[in-house]
Amino acid sequence: MIRVAIFASGTGTNALNLLRTAKNLKQLQIPLVIIDQTKSTLPDVLKKEFPEVTVAIVLAPKIQDVEERRRQHEKEIVALLTQHQIDWCFLAGYMRLLGPTLLSAFKEGTQSRIVNIHPSLLPLYPGTQAYEKVFEANDPKSGVTIHFVDEGMDTGPIIVQEVFERKLDETFEQFKERGLKLEWQTYAAILKRLHDEQTLKPRSESETRKT
Ligand code: GRF
């Protein structure tokens, strides 16, 4: 049985979609969701739909030094992940860079077990407000990237990219809605792949050429 934890900060539509997907996977469970914000509406939704899932709100401690704050925050998170015997972490709208404390706890050799979803064709438009940046740029196509997490901002090795065309007459809201649907679909497929293959690998050279 593979045990996955989800990390979220905001609305959590990706988190909910992963939890719904996992319900149909026999050899994979999501027993833990970690949220780093008090303002997230996700805990209330989870309590109703997934009462069996532990929802941990883990706030970063109020320490000025960024590295020390991250280290202590991640130490608390790693303790929770260990307690819940978590094998893989799926970041779903988690608005925080990860540091060595968490990354090293989920890395064996070159195999990382922390993944993230980002709504652009990385390396284009990393960081926050990617939909806004893509829309303003008027690029003819955009997409969704799922990648392993390293210490950089959306810089880790890519597992998969899915493309969607830009429609010239659509509003920003319509564009983002289409993008989010593709996010849910792509992240669910990667969760299923983890279930079926017991691991995830960076994409091959031939897959890279397709986008
Ligand atoms: C998604 O667009 C995700 O790709 C990005 O943040 C957004 C979070 O949406 N990293 P939600 O919280 O999953 O609804």
Image (tube, helix red, strand yellow):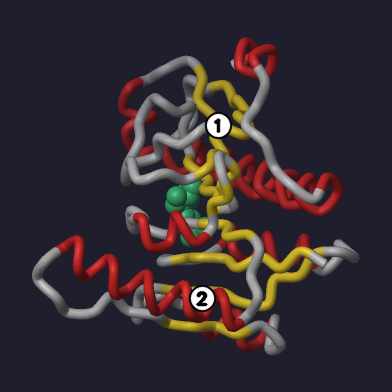
Q: Is residue 147 left or right of residue 20?
A: left
Looking at the figure, which quarter contains the C terminus? top right
**127 above or below 14?**
above
Q: What residue does disc 2 label?
A: 42
Residue 45 x %, y % = 58, 80
Task: Name the quadrant containing residue 210.
Answer: top right
What residue appears at the point 42 percent right and 66 percent down from the top-left corner? 10
Residue 66 x %, y % = 16, 62
Q: Residues within 10 Å of mark 2 (few under 14, many from 20)?
A: many
Residue found farthest to the front: 109
Is residue 128 visible in the rendered image? The answer is yes
Disc 1 and disc 2: Cα gap in Å? 27 Å
Residue found farthest to the left: 64
**80 above or below 174?**
below
What residue appears at the point 78 percent right and 45 percent down from the top-left corner? 193
* Local secondary structure at mark 1: strand
**77 above or below 162?**
below
Residue 100 x %, y % = 36, 55
Kind of residue at disc 2? Leu
Q: Is residue 98 left or right of residue 60?
A: right
Q: Nearer the viewer, mark 1 or mark 2?
A: 1
Looking at the figure, which quarter contains the N terminus? bottom right
Residue found farthest to the right: 26
Q: What number is the disc on residue 158?
A: 1
What residue appears at the point 55 percent right and 49 percent down from the top-left corner? 115
Kind of residue at disc 1? Ile
Q: Indicate yes or no: mark 2 CB to ligand 1 under 8 Å.
A: yes
What residue appears at the point 58 percent right and 39 percent down from the top-left corner? 178
Q: Residues within 10 Å of mark 1 (few under 14, many from 20)?
A: many
Q: What number is the disc on residue 125?
A: none
Give the camera-side residue of 39 and 85: 85
